[in-house]
Image (tube, grey):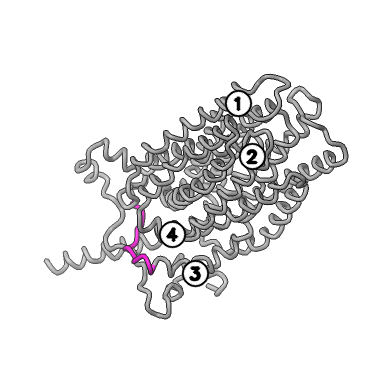
Amino acid sequence: MSKFDAAPPNTHAGGDDEALRTHGTLPMNLGVDGDERVDMDAYKEAVPLWKRVHQHSLTQMMLLSVQAFCGPAMADAIAGLGGGGLATPQTSNIATAINYAMLAIVCLFGGPIVNKLGTKWSLVIGAMSFPIRGSSYYCNSKFGTQWYLIFGGFFTGIGSGCWYVAESGSIMSLAPSHARGKYLALWIVSRNLGQLVGGAINLSKNHVKGATGGVTPDTYVAFLIIEALALPFAFLISPLEKVVRSDGTRILVSEKLSFMQEFKLIRFTMSSKLILLSAFWALWSFFYSGSWSTYLGTYFSVRSRALSSLVSPFFCIIGCFGLGFVLDIKGLSQRRRAQLGLFIVVILNLGVYIWSIVMQVRFNDSNPGKIDWDDSLYPTGFLPYFFVQTTGPLSQSYMYWLLSSFATDAQANVRNGAAFRCLEAVGQAISYGMNTQIKSNTLIGFCVTFGLMGAAVIPMLMLVNSTPDRIPADEILEGQEKQQEKKIENLKATEA
């Protein structure tokens, strides 16, 4: 194996474990002793059915997906109104930029925080913050209260940061190796199903032709109620070490490190090849959201924006499951699947960006005013937004699948997910910050997004070409099983 092909230091995949040590003193984050494969017959006899169902990896993934439905999906539905559904998008963009700035800071230190608090309590903290978003938009729409919108963005960013780090580590750890693409598709689809519900609410309350300004305040009340439902599902999350996957394996969880040792690992994670080569992709993957949200709020009527939040998720559901099946093709090695997935994602995004830039140039030459859904310009103006709501989630789903291809245990997934989500949030904060000015031109945002994708492709190609053919965590697990079997054989030989 060449030096380039060696896996990033924080994943142990290439065997370069010394890279994890700080001046030679940091202890290794070794896997726990014992056989991690469950004897399913004994497990069924010893554990009640309700508990087996609760601890099943698919159940836990569904619990996470319900929370994604109630929290991030409702935030996306609000963003899908264009400028948060407010009369002008600038205040919403300021609040959203602050939200993502705080989210980036929390995600930077999220690995140590989540690994210390545990997945469950990090998700609980995040779920408690979700209703703040809906209530802040309601107060702004009903009473014109701008300070609470910005205040809400600040605190929602902190809570969401804890939630996102715990979520990213979990979704990359829960799935059996042969079904990671489908599990990630389920997660992405749950977010888009949430947008469908949110879109239906939007359209039912904002369907009158000729309405101006923002959406009705009652719209945000419905979002607020759904956001509050995430908390009880967060309490149902089981610790990762107790989860049993459908293939009879447990999640490889390493022994706990101290808080200071976890903090020392931040530098190694952020400087690992895995994160450095995916940094531009992380900045780009959500960067589109600020410019496209402003584009929708600037050029489309209230009811056409409400319609957009309903129809945008449809194609995404099909696309994400399609990509999931591609990434789980059994006849191809993991590296070949990674290469094929990268090609699909880049080509689709390339087409959407070119179309979006062409439309924005046309709008700069001749301002169309507020486009309604019965205008002849609506299909060509709206479809770029419609498709980017598919290509964007495809980019994110693919990247989390790729990150999980390098990790050795649940803690590594948390650290890698935290680093990647931190960079994503930085990109989102910059994107919405660029669109806080009233005179800002969304063409600039489109071109910057296009440029970021171009900058991300070459490093990503280098990373994809170094993808291990098997997940390092699976190889470690098999090694532990062989050691355990050898111990049993030696014990039997001694007794004989």
Mark 4 and mark 3 lie on one chain; the one further toward the N terminus is: 4
Residue closest to the eye, 327 or 382: 382
Seen from the viewer's position, the closer of residues 476 and 50 is: 50
User: Is 134 one of the magenta-colored residues?
Assistant: no
**Looking at the image, which residue is at 48% across and 49% down?**
164
In this rendering, the count of numbered labels is 4
Under mark 4, the amino acid is Gly
Measure the alpha-carbon separation of dots 2 and 3. 33 Å
Residue 427 visible in the shown view: yes
Tag in front: 2 or 4 = 4
User: Magenta region: which residues?
Assistant: 250-261
Residue under numbered circle 2: 389
- Reply above or below: 482 against 120: below
Q: Picture coordinates of residue 292 (x, y %)?
A: 69, 42
Characterize the local packing of mark 1: few (<14), some (14-19) or many (20 or more) Cα atoms within 10 angstroms.
some
What numbered label is drawn on residue 79? none
- C-alpha distance separating marks 3 and 1: 46 Å
Q: Which residue is mark 3?
A: 267
SS of the residue under disc 1? loop
Q: Element type at marker 4?
A: helix
Mark nearest the camera among 2 and 3 is 3
> Quarter holding the C terminus?
bottom left
* Residue farthest bottom in this picture: 23
Quickly name the residue at label 1: 216
- Report if the CB atoms under discs 1 and 2 are less than 8 Å apart: no
Question: In the figure, residue 413 lies in which quadrant?
Answer: bottom left
- What's under tag 3, amino acid-wise? Arg
Q: Secondary structure at mark 2?
A: helix
Q: What amino acid is labelled 1 in the image? A: Thr
The residue under label 4 is: 111
